[in-house]
Amino acid sequence: MNKNTVIPDLSNLWMPFTANRAFKHDPRLIVGAQGMYYTSIDGSKILDSTSGLWCVNAGHGRQEIVDALARQSAQLDYAPGFQMGHPNSFRAATAVAQLMPEGLDRIFFTNSGSESVDTALKIALAYHRARGEGQRTRFIGRERGYHGVGFGGISVGGITPNRKAFSGALLPSVDHLRHTHDLSHNAFSHGQPAWGAHLADELEELVSLHDASTIAAVIVEPMAGSAGVLIPPLGYLERLRAITEKHGILLIFDEVITGFGRLGAATASEFFQVTPDIITLAKGISNAAVPCGAVAVRRSVHDAIIESVDTGIELFHGYTYSGHPLATAAVLATLDIYRREDLFARAAVMAPVLEKAAHRLQDARHVVDVRNLGLVAGIELEPRPGAPGARTAEAFKRCFDSGVLLRYTGDTIAVSPPLIVEEDQIEQLFSIIAEVLDGID
Ligand SMILES: Cc1ncc(COP(=O)(O)O)c(C=O)c1O
């Protein structure tokens, strides 16, 4: 028997964001991955329609990354990043900066999206303090926003189950904008919905309520992925930018999902032509081969903090593994693949193919909305009465058994394949989704 087919003892591992009891009763184990496919423990091939967790943008098992990691771990396994450095962390920062919008060229490395978010929030506070506006301590997030699982991230985030068990310990000075998702106006939109730019004007109301002088930053995902593919209405992000600029409030775009090609450009900021002050990154930065995240900061924000102290450490923040040699080797190799294969442009070319295939589900059973942007599609199902999320959970399991890995949140299925996806794979995955939807109650 292939040793991969032996299921290990499952009891010790407390799995993240998982229904542990259900999983251990009916486990789904992955033992390999190459290109667009996972291999499950029984040897079957599973088409990866979600880039792992929105992170394997260049496809699985890329040899260039494998080689870079092998070389790096043989040469330098670890070097402290505090008061010391190693060349690849500087090179990787330069390579990331080159992909960011003009002016956001100061890069702080983290190990995850959650750490990037908490780092960005701290940088915002430090910036205002350095300029003598230390009373700007309030953050504005948005309902249904997902910004990871740190206390900062869940405080500015707007996903109720992620917050409620910890509600007594959230950051105290946070308010939220309304989310922009409204099927009564925007169902079955192709690309950005036409209705909803005015929702950004609520920020003016929050500014009047709290006074701009108390607000440090607004943080939003330019396109929200984890909360169910929420696409910004036309003009919405532009208005947020105008209002934040007017009041001296920093704008943070959480691009943990949208960074590195997901919308067919290096960043969502570039795609929408709206430039924030800080961008949080992770996932596709290293093609998920090694955990890595980063925060790209406007040079003037960085300089205000760096120049605020005469000598010594300017920002008391960092991680043992910020700019880890393996992570930065993976970043360099990954960004090299994106560039050589022009994968962001490829995503833009494949986006209409995905759009067309996704919208064919408009008349499929249970479907109440299909939405798309770049290489992302959301398919929203009518919830089962009294059991929200049950229908998507069943669709997820059945699709997996039929050879397609999906992601779902609540009653929305999200499709976000690696940027190397081929047309026939897109066709295949949407026909399997249609078949599965037809077969469930
Ligand atoms: C927009 C956004 N921010 C932050 C995170 C958290 O990233 P991580 O799970 O790497 O901490 C995610 C993860 O999906 C995300 O989508």
Image (cartoon, grey):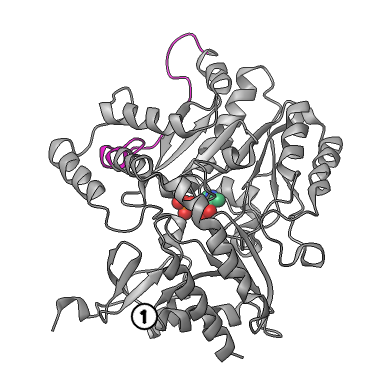
Magenta span has 302?
Answer: no
Q: Give left or right: position of 409 versus 55.
A: right
Residue 156's place in the image compared with 240, above or below, is below
Percent x, y of residue 34: 28, 63
Residue 415's place in the image compared with 339, above or below, is below
Q: Residue at x 73, y 38 (%)?
A: 238
Percent x, y of residue 302: 53, 22
Residue labelled with disc 1: 27
Is residue 413 visible from the viewing direction of this image?
Answer: no
Q: Residue at x 22, y 51 (%)?
A: 63
- Which residue is more in the foreground, 76 or 59? 59
Magenta span has 327?
Answer: yes
Q: Quadrant of residue 216?
A: top right
Percent x, y of residue 305: 54, 19
Quadrant position of the N terminus in the picture: bottom left
Q: Residue at x 36, y 80 (%)?
A: 27
The amino acid beneath tag 1 is Pro
Q: Quadrant of residue 358?
A: bottom right
The magenta-colored residue range is 309-329
Q: Residue at x 78, y 27 (%)?
A: 246
- Which residue is more in the foreground, 371 or 346? 346
